[in-house]
Image (cartoon, rainbow, N blue to C red):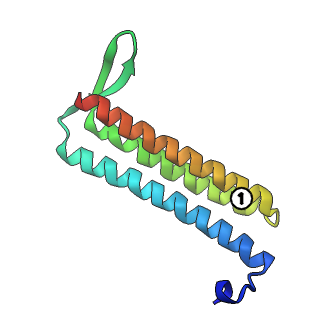
Amino acid sequence: MLYATGMLTQNNKRNLLEYSLIAANALVLGLIWFVAVWRFSVSEDFIPLHYTIYFGLDRFGPKYDLFLFPTLGSVILGVNLLVSRVAFWGNYLWQGLFLGFTLLEEVVLLVSLILALLKGLS
């Protein structure tokens, strides 16, 4: 309704930006959890944990280590949401930047999880 009439106020724009960044963070974190749970159910007991360009796969571990990525992502998101609300209260620029960088961290975690799983398949 606000979009149709063109009466979107500055405060509503700030709230929309904040909520859309939180929703994007939650979506990426949900994808991380989905990939980890899906691969856990079909993985062998030991999975590759580390890859170097010189030696290839050089460290293996239990498949429970797949949950390191989503757990770390959940902790990062929770702490950053708390810091964003408490430390940057009323400063919408820093809240937006902090949530944007949190989204970047979550995307990096998702990409690293997918690349680790793809390298383990080859």
Q: Residue furthest right?
A: 91
Q: Is residue 71 above or below residue 45?
A: below
Report the residue at 63% width, 59% height from top: 81
Which residue has dot 1 on it?
Answer: 96
Where is residue 96 shown, x and y percent of the image? 71, 58
> Where does the image place residue 11, in percent across and percent down from the top left?
78, 76
For image coordinates 65% across by 59% down, the residue present is 82
Does residue 71 appear in the picture of this structure? yes
x, y percent for residue 88: 78, 59
| Residue 88 seen | no
Q: Nearer the viewer, residue 67 or 29?
A: 29
> Looking at the image, is 2 positioned above or below residue 23?
below
Q: Which residue is the extreme one toward the top?
A: 54
Q: Quadrant of residue 78?
A: bottom right
Horizontally, is 107 left or right of 40 in the view? right
Closer to us: 103 or 8 = 8
Quadrant location, the N terminus: bottom right
The image shows residue 93 at horizontal and vertical percentages of 79, 58
> Hey, what amino acid is under mark 1?
Gly
Residue at the (31%, 36%) spot, across then down? 117
- Left or right: where 60 falls relative to 71: left
